[in-house]
Amino acid sequence: MKARTLPRASASGSTLGARERVLSAAYDLFSRKGIRAVGIDTIIARAGVAKMSFYRHFPSKDELVLAFLQKREQLWTHEWLEAEVNRRAVTPRKRLLAIFDVFDEWFQREDFEGCSFINVLLEVVDADHPARQATTSHLANIRVLLRALAEGAGVARSDDFARKWHILMKGSIVAAGEGDRLAARRAQAVGRLLLAAELDGRRGQPHERMAEPCSG
């Protein structure tokens, strides 16, 4: 089953307001080049807005970065990863494994850009910086999804499991960025072992709950 194209922020155009054009330009530039390497002037030129208009909507670059991270969660976490996993599998256990099927196709793409949340963590080392705090929150929201799947699959310690699964996800993304195009398949193989170990003590208990089918 072929994955759908990764959602992108709306393309700039005359039908979009200045704020949307700026955010769209920043989304494309930040996701591909990082937040430090891209300056305000580059974003303004790409968005085709006046500098005064830019600062009217985003008084600082930090505020634009926070909006970008929120948009990334909407488009990458929910509209792409979560939706694609739900489309491919029905049960919680299969949905956990399907994450790496989706990743595998993503890693083969020529425009594979890596994880913006991981990239921001590496770029911003100050623990009190708003961008770093926002990034850790967005990553925690991914674990909320993983925890729900773990609970649905019958995993007893769902938070601990979600953190382990998240390590597999993040590690595979970094490995793919390093050039390992098979990273998702390797991570999935380890994930199968982890699932088997976690569910081994559940033998004789009721089967995992059936997740609600994806709507839409």
Image: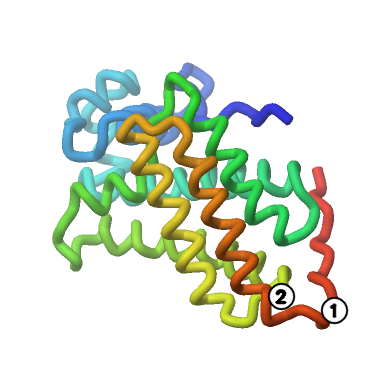
Disc 1 + disc 2, Cβ < 8 Å = yes
**Residue that mark 2 sits on:** 154
Which residue is drawn at the image coordinates 23% and 32% (left, top)? 52
| Quadrant, the N terminus | top right
CA separation in Å, label 1 and label 2: 9 Å
Place of residue 79 in the rendered image (x, y in percent of width and height, measured from the top left): 61, 43
Q: Is residue 3 left or right of residue 121?
A: right
Which residue is drawn at the image coordinates 64% and 69% (left, top)? 150
Identify whether 138 is placed above or below 71. Answer: below
Which disc number belongs to residue 33?
A: none
Q: Quadrant of residue 137?
A: bottom left
Place of residue 201 in the rendered image (x, y in percent of width and height, measured from the top left): 68, 81
Q: Residues within 10 Å of mark 2 (few under 14, many from 20)?
A: many
Q: Is residue 209 left or right of residue 15?
A: right
Which disc number belongs to residue 206?
A: 1
Helix, strand or loop at mark 1 = loop
| Quadrant, the C terminus | top right
